[in-house]
Image: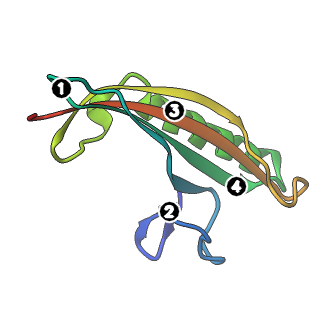
């Protein structure tokens, strides 16, 4: 995967720089943050999307975007050690996708989306 100015080609906000090479990974904000804690614990379920954007000008570049999307899925699915959250223990991570994501110019661009559901429990309550 190409880098951007010596850093990973991963962005946490939009718009992404116009000169960033393809494919790009864009981590979106929380879609939902559900507190399911009780009297003896603090429990959260967080949903977040990771979008992978690439070019659709050749079959090879299309397949690269798909491969990156599946790599993102495989990195997180049922792998609670994939992330750390300060003050929390990661109980599990589930993924959905990669699924189709819309683009403005489908003849030139392609996008896939991986949705994460992250289950957290407070480290101390």
Query: In this rendering, which labeled residue sits more in front, label 1 or label 4?
Result: 1
* 24 versus 74 height, above or below: below
Residue at image mark 1: 41
Describe residue 21's horizontal placement relative to residue 77 as left or right: right
Q: Position of residue 2 (x, y in %)?
A: 53, 61
* 53 versus 65 height, above or below: below
Residue at image mark 4: 54
Give the mark, 1 or 3, whose residue is nearer the N terminus.
1
Q: Residue furthest right?
A: 107
Q: Are marks 1 and 3 in contact (CB under 8 Å)?
A: no
Query: Label 2: how many residues lie within 10 Å, few (<14), some (14-19) or many (20+)?
Result: some
> Which disc number belongs to residue 115?
none
Query: In this rendering, which labeled residue sits more in front, label 2 or label 1?
Result: 1
Spatial separation of the CA atoms under disc 1 and disc 3: 29 Å
Q: Are marks 2 and 1 in contact (CB under 8 Å)?
A: no
Spatial separation of the CA atoms under disc 3 and disc 2: 17 Å
15 or 32: nearer the eye?
A: 32
Q: In percent of the image, x 12 and y 35: which residue is there?
A: 123
Spatial separation of the CA atoms under disc 3 and disc 4: 16 Å
Q: Secondary structure at mark 2?
A: loop
Determine the image quadrant of residue 67. top right
Residue at image mark 2: 9
């Amino acid at each position: 995967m190409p880098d951007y100015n010596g850093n990973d080609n991963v962005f946490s906000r939009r718009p992404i720089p116009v000169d960033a090479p393809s494919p790009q990974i864009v981590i979106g904000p929380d879609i939902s943050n559900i507190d399911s804690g009780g009297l003896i614990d603090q429990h959260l379920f967080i949903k977040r999307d990771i979008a992978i954007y690439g070019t659709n000008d050749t079959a090879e570049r299309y397949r690269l975007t798909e491969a990156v999307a599946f790599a993102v899925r495989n990195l997180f699915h049922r792998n609670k050690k994939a992330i750390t959250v300060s003050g929390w223990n990661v109980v599990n991570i589930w993924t959905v996708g990669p699924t189709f994501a819309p683009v403005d110019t489908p003849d030139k661009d392609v996008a896939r989306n991986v949705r994460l559901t992250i289950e957290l429990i407070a480290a101390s309550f």
